[in-house]
Amino acid sequence: MKQRKRIAVLGATGSIGSQTLDIISAHSELYEATVLSAGQRVGDLIKLALRHRPRLAVIADNTLLPILRDALEPKGIECAAGAEALAECVEADYVDTVLTATVGYSGLEPTVHAIKAGKDIALANKETLVVAGDFVNHLLKGSISKIYPVDSEHSAVAQCLEGEDVSKVSRLLITASGGPFRTWPKERIDNASAVDALRHPNWNMGRKITIDSATMLNKAFEIIEAHHLFGIEGERIEAVVHPQSIVHSMVEYTDGAIKAQLGVPDMHIPIAYALGANSRLQGVSKHLRIEDFATLTFEKPDTDKFPCLTLAHYALKRGGNTACVVNAANEIAVEAFLNGRIRFSDIYKTIENTLIAASFVGNPQYEDYVSSNTEARCIAADFINKIS
Ligand code: MG
């Protein structure tokens, strides 16, 4: 019997994590979850660990380790806690592929460790490439590890690029649903509540990414992510609003042909494609009945209403630590917005202000990303204290 692929699922209790575990248990002839991690949801992690029987369970919050141990050690499941344990667990010899579905900046360190240890990565944490894409690509050059995108748009691009020559690409068209505020007037968007922003029309996702979808910063991040994943310069990557979320992205070639990947908006498809190192599994998701869709529409995004979208090309042009600063300011701003401290339009203002005040580093090394992230968070928090 062929050995099963052993998966470390980082962020197991979140939306991508649980859908990954669905696939692993439905295909236990192919996959096995050997590490599960969570941030703070220790109860959920315990339940998952008892069901999926990993070798190791890791909780990011140190204070929760005793609870985890009491529940899992008697069952023979090893337990660990803290950021260091989270970064190191991916190096274990019982891990082949690391699925990173943690939220935000925290995804970077484990990914760096995984690349250094030569593990393959199914990347669901887009902030890793947004924050430190150049650095990660540099590491990949000296490693046997490969990154397989889990983000639906990048999975679509990877599928459209299959068998093609990247030098024949003229544009990547990253589709965007437009989020819950697509049809709202600007003044109403500026004052939208967290409840409004959390109501995504097509995708069921975690809170942070749902707010990023509402501001469309998520799409800006995906443009940056696509640049680093596929080596296509920023000017040739564009966002296209497609409210039905059926076309998951497109690649336009130099002869004028456009290839698109379509399907129901269900993350099981891109997760399974990434876990299989870009190969297909049967029965992963409901099939799309294209004949049920009378119209698929496409439009240009409105950057007056969604200024965050402009940050992609700005960050790629300016380079260095710019995207790292944008990400850090955004993480602080989204949290303040969810806590009712700032208005929706203040998310962009916080990022803009932080970009002006933060130090620019042209050719950042790992430590520069760490200090830049810390500095930008402080600047953003100060700005929010002033305006809230
Ligand atoms: Mg996406």
Image: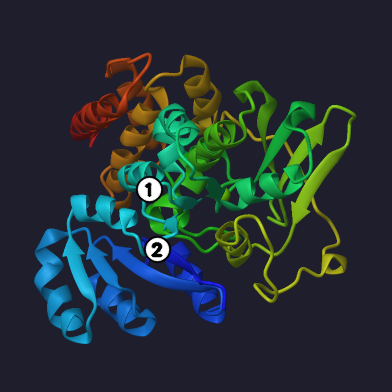
Helix, strand or loop status at disc 2: strand
Where is residue 215? Give x, y as percent.
48, 41
Among the 4 quarters of the image, the one containing residue 40? bottom left
Residue at 30 percent across and 29 percent down: it is 366
Is 315 placed above or below 242 here?
A: above
Where is residue 111? Give x, y as percent.
38, 45
Do residues under tags 2 and 1 come within 8 Å of each other at their CB atoms? no
Nearer-N-terminus badge (2/1):
2
Q: Where residue 9 is drawn, which disc sits there?
A: 2
Q: How many marks?
A: 2
Is 119 placed above or below 363 here?
A: below
Q: CA distance from mark 2 to mark 1?
A: 12 Å
Q: Residues within 10 Å of mark 1 (few under 14, many from 20)?
A: many
Helix, strand or loop status at disc 1: helix
Q: Residues within 10 Å of mark 2 (few under 14, many from 20)?
A: many
Depth order, front residue of 302/221: 221
Residue at 16 percent across and 85 percent down: it is 74
Is 65 placed above or below 355 here?
A: below
Q: Amino acid at mark 1?
A: Ala
Depth order, front residue of 312/164: 164
Residue indicated by mark 1:
114
Q: Amino acid at mark 2?
A: Val
> In this rendering, would 147 be left or right of 89?
right
Where is residue 274? Give x, y as percent.
58, 57
Where is residue 323? Give x, y as percent.
42, 28
Q: Which marked residue is nearer to the observer: mark 2 or mark 1? A: 1
Residue at 42 percent across and 46 percent down: it is 118
